[in-house]
Amino acid sequence: MTHAWLFVGPPGSGRSNAAKAFAAALQCPRGGCGTCNDCRTARSGAHPDVTLLRTEKLSIGVDEVRDLVSRANVAPMNGRWQAVVVEDADRITERGADALLKAIEEPAPKTVWLLCAPSADDVIVTIRSRCRELRLVTPPVEAVANLLVERDGVHEGIAWYSAQAAQGHVGRARALALNDEVRSRRMRVLALPAKLNALSDCLNAAANLVEEASAEATALTADLDAREMADLQAALGMATRGAKARGAQGAIKDLEEQQKIRVKRYQRDAIDRALTELTGWYRDVLAAQTAPGVRFVNSDLADQIIPFAQRTRPEQTVRAIDALLACRQALERNVAPTLALEAMLVELGRASH
């Protein structure tokens, strides 16, 4: 046992679920039975000695980390452990990392930090060197398909299609299996490489991707935004006609700014899913060109992938994959999504001919 753990693994590997299960096991008198009140409340975030942090912003700032550190220093109520789960440790800012480092260097006796990140390199070296690392892997397609059939009642054929298309990402596979619009959106994205014949096609495709991502983000947050605003106005006494609490406009403006940041995060997530889909498509093209017999990620589109692979060269495919990686890096540097996508799609167009 140690005071700091780092769960790493690719998207869909279940690192945050593993961390929450670990936190539950620390609280459970039987070491993690999964059924007692301690286990259930720890995994849901309702346990008084388990703190879960998952940001809806693009980053986790120093103020949030300091609040977290303050909570972590409180003695556990039941005398076992004070567990702190940070689902997006890779999003902690530099100043936030400094505040977290001090807490990990000088931990409270009963506090356990459970950090999650895609890879150890995404966490600053001074923090990861003080953590015990647990590496997770993407679950196999068979396991994801069986989970969808047994847990969600998905038809076996749809379950296998979704698990394969999601490349082992359980959440993405579930969305594909249960939502027709998600499947339609995937098909629209994967149809792009064959349609990039002119500069105007690339620019229009970039605009459409940004528009769809924005619409998806707005749809996901609209109800939550409305509830938060209504709750804030009620707390400020603005439900009474004509009542205006001191500082109300400032509080409302702060909430609106936070909501805009959340929408931006959801938009970036939607764009990232599109980039993942395209990367898988070009991976299949490269496999067809250089490793015949390798199973495609997008096996349902083999009749499109194979002709595309035959009329292009592996060098072009590698250049397309490099363009996708460059787009991701540009988005991480906060380049405007439209500009990053336009540059990427122009390169994809060049690599298609």
Image (cartoon, rainbow, N blue to C red):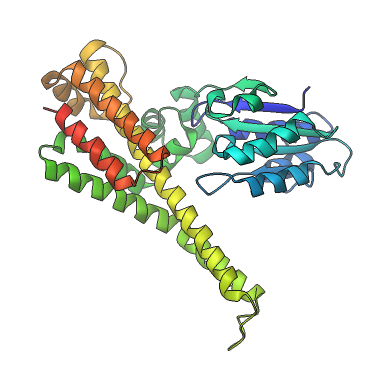
Q: Could you say where residue 209 lies in the image, as x and y percent from the top left?
A: 28, 47
Nearest the eye: 317 or 154: 317
Q: Is residue 214 visible?
A: yes
Give the quarter of the image for residue 176: top left
Instruction: In the rendered view, tell whether residue 230 sits above or below residue 305.
Output: below
The residue at the point 61 percent across, 70 percent down is: 232
Quadrant (top left/top right/bottom left/bottom right) for the C terminus: top left
Q: Is residue 33 visible?
A: no
Q: Could you say where residue 114 lies in the image, as x and y percent from the top left?
A: 68, 32
Seen in the image, is 56 located left or right of residue 113? left
Q: Residue furthest right?
A: 79
Quadrant (top left/top right/bottom left/bottom right) for the N terminus: top right
The residue at the point 73 percent across, 34 percent down is: 102
Seen in the image, is 205 located left or right of residue 181? left
Give the quarter of the image for residue 300: top left
Nearest the eye: 330 or 281: 330
Seen in the image, is 350 located left or right of residue 8? left
Q: Could you say where residue 79 lies in the image, as x and y percent from the top left?
A: 89, 38
The residue at the point 41 percent across, 58 percent down is: 218
Instruction: In the rendered view, tell whether residue 303 sits above or below residue 243.
Output: above
Nearest the eye: 303 or 278: 278
Nearest the eye: 250 or 310: 250
The residue at the point 21 percent across, 14 percent down is: 289
Q: Could you say where residue 52 lies in the image, as x and y percent from the top left?
A: 67, 43
Instruction: In the rendered view, tell whether residue 158 sits above or below residue 294.
Output: below
Give the quarter of the image for residue 199: top left
Give the number of callouts. Answer: 0
